[in-house]
Image: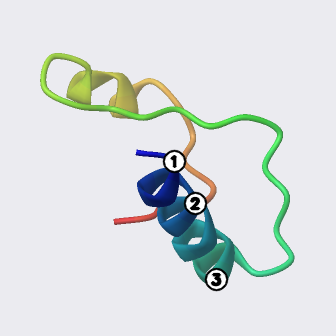
Amino acid sequence: MYHSINETTEFIRRKIGDFTPEFGIILGTGLGKLVDEIEVEYQLM
């Protein structure tokens, strides 16, 4: 599992470059409507 976490971390770092987020929100089933209530500045898909 540790290896998977490291791979995911590196994938995200490659995607965001020098951008340093203050916080992140992960939305899934049931929380998708929250996206209508917040201002999305950066999104990974």
Pair 1/2: label in front: 1
* Disc 1 residue type (three-letter): Tyr
**For numbered disc 1, what is the local secondary structure?**
helix
Task: Determine which quarter of the picture holds residue 28.
Answer: top left
Kindly indicate whether the residue at mark 2 contacts the one at mark 1 (C-beta within 8 angstroms). Answer: yes
CA neighbours of label 2 inside 10 A, class few (<14), some (14 to 19), many (20+)? few
Q: Which residue is mark 1?
A: 2
Pair 1/3: label in front: 1
Mark 2 vs 3, N-terminal side: 2
Quarter of the image with the C terminus is bottom left
Q: Which residue is mark 2?
A: 6
Q: Residue lying farthest left?
A: 29
In the rendered structure, the answer to whether residue 27 lies left or right of residue 21 reads left
- Say if 28 sits above or below 6 in the image: above
Distance CA(mark 1)–CA(mark 3): 19 Å
**For numbered disc 3, what is the local secondary structure?**
helix
Q: Position of residue 8 (x, y in %)?
A: 48, 62
Mark 1 vs 3, N-terminal side: 1
Q: Which residue is mark 3?
A: 14
In the rendered structure, the answer to whether residue 13 lies left or right of residue 20 reads left
* Disc 2 residue type (three-letter): Asn
